[in-house]
Image: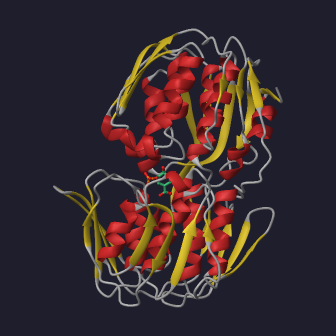
Amino acid sequence: MTAAARIQPLRARRSGPLVGRVTAPGDKSISHRSLILGLLAVGETRVRGLLMAEDVLNTAAACRALGAAVEISAAGEARVQGRGIGGLVEPEDVLDFGNSGTGARLMMGVLASHPLLAVATGDASLRRRPMGRVARPLESMGAELRLRAGDRLPGAIRGTGEALPIRYRLPVPSAQVKSAILLAGLNARGETTVIEPEPTRDHSERMLRHFGATVRVEDTAEGRVVTLVGQPELEGRSIDVPADPSSAAFALVAAAIVPGSRVTVAGVGLNPLRTGLLATLEEMGCDLSYGQRREVGGEPVAELTVRHGRLKGTIVPPERAPSMIDEYPILAVAAACAEGKTEMRGLAELRVKESDRLGAVAQGLAACGVKVEEGKDSLVIHGQGKPPAGGASIAARLDHRIAMSFLVLGLASRDPVAIDDIASIATSFPDFVALMRGLGADLAAP
Ligand code: S3P
């Protein structure tokens, strides 16, 4: 997001039944990776269904700055003429990743194993987020990184043309860190291995293979061990991007909590490492059904339908966290409308997302009259089985998922919920307001 973006307040009011069939926007994780692997491939990569949102467009701009030709149509068809591994050019200016941790961290991996100097920055949210988690392993591969105090951006990376392959055990469950190391490993001689004690989304592994790399995955006592054979020749490919389950989640939960609703979301990616929210909603008694199962771009997809019904509280196991890490804010909204207590633990990573999501959710729900217990890495929500009071104004904190989650809450609350600024929604889901209004949501300027 640019600093000059206009402030856009919005309020959500208790709505009649939400009804309809919609398609969620393209998957953000897969969209970033399509462009980045397109940059590193030789020849043309064609992407259909690219997420047309600020985060992804910033990654496209970074790919151009590194020498790729990237053309994107308004409908989300992209063509990337890649430079090939080792063939990147030094960017002439600072790379601005806006709000996107994925764009910044994955690109830091790419830059680390190319002999060039690059400076990376982002918006106020991204400049607060920890980058040491990618800097440390990339330094051990031979890159030099200079970051601001607290390992924050802006930062400079001097990559190396002779990167060393490493074997690295992830200290935090993070697909971004795993992916940064694998991307750096593409231009290292030999095998780069990442060990993840808790499995995280595996889009990088799947897509690296699709582009022609050799990636081995083993489940061992240490965890999931991912090994990439360095210096492959990646070839431009075609990619169909499925709809993003993390974006679909907002319409699905809205249908679950607004009386009389029935909403279908088409073509949703159901990568097994991303389906924690759906499992949790089912445990809460959500009326969720699957249709039209098929494969899109090497990922399982289905059409999901949710009907409104009574939800009950549940205990979300901490080991499920990586498979629903972006969905806790919207799950918390469902829990606030459910009957009984919902316990969520193992949420330390939520503190370092686009905002401190644990704090934002706890404070926002409390302001809407919901009883919440916030722990260091846990959240317990006491649902009353009836609409929350609402009637609060919520600070979005430059966090798209906080803005969308509290708008959804407002659709089921007694009194309206206002968001101070929804501009951040454009980072991942620019059509959110139009899509929700199309289903019947009462969203308007306050
Ligand atoms: C992502 C990984 C996750 C997730 C983010 C997208 C990715 O971040 O929260 O929205 O595309 O690799 P972490 O790696 O920080 O868990």
Report whether 199 appears left or right of 151.
left
Residue 129 spot, x, y in % from top left: 48, 53
Residue 420 location, quadrant: top right
Residue that appears at 41% across and 81% down: 186
Total number of numbered discs in the rendering: 0
Residue 295 visible within the image? no
Residue that appears at 60% across and 60% down: 122
- Looking at the image, residue 423 lies above or below residue 188: above
- Looking at the image, residue 85 lies above or below residue 218: below
Residue that appears at 65% across and 55% down: 26
Residue 160 visible within the image? yes
- Looking at the image, residue 115 lies above or below residue 244: below
- In the rendered view of the protein, which quadrant contains the N terminus? bottom right
* Picture colour scheme: secondary structure
* Front residue of this view, candidates 422 and 17: 422
* Front residue of this view, candidates 255 and 186: 186
Residue at the extreme right of the image, as rendered: 445
Residue 176 location, quadrant: bottom left
Residue 373 location, quadrant: top left
* Front residue of this view, candidates 122 and 102: 122
- In the rendered view of the protein, which quadrant contains the C terminus? top right
Residue 347 spot, x, y in % from top left: 38, 37
Residue at the extreme left of the image, as rendered: 221
Residue 341 spot, x, y in % from top left: 41, 15
Residue 113 spot, x, y in % from top left: 42, 82
- Looking at the image, residue 51 lies above or below residue 412: below
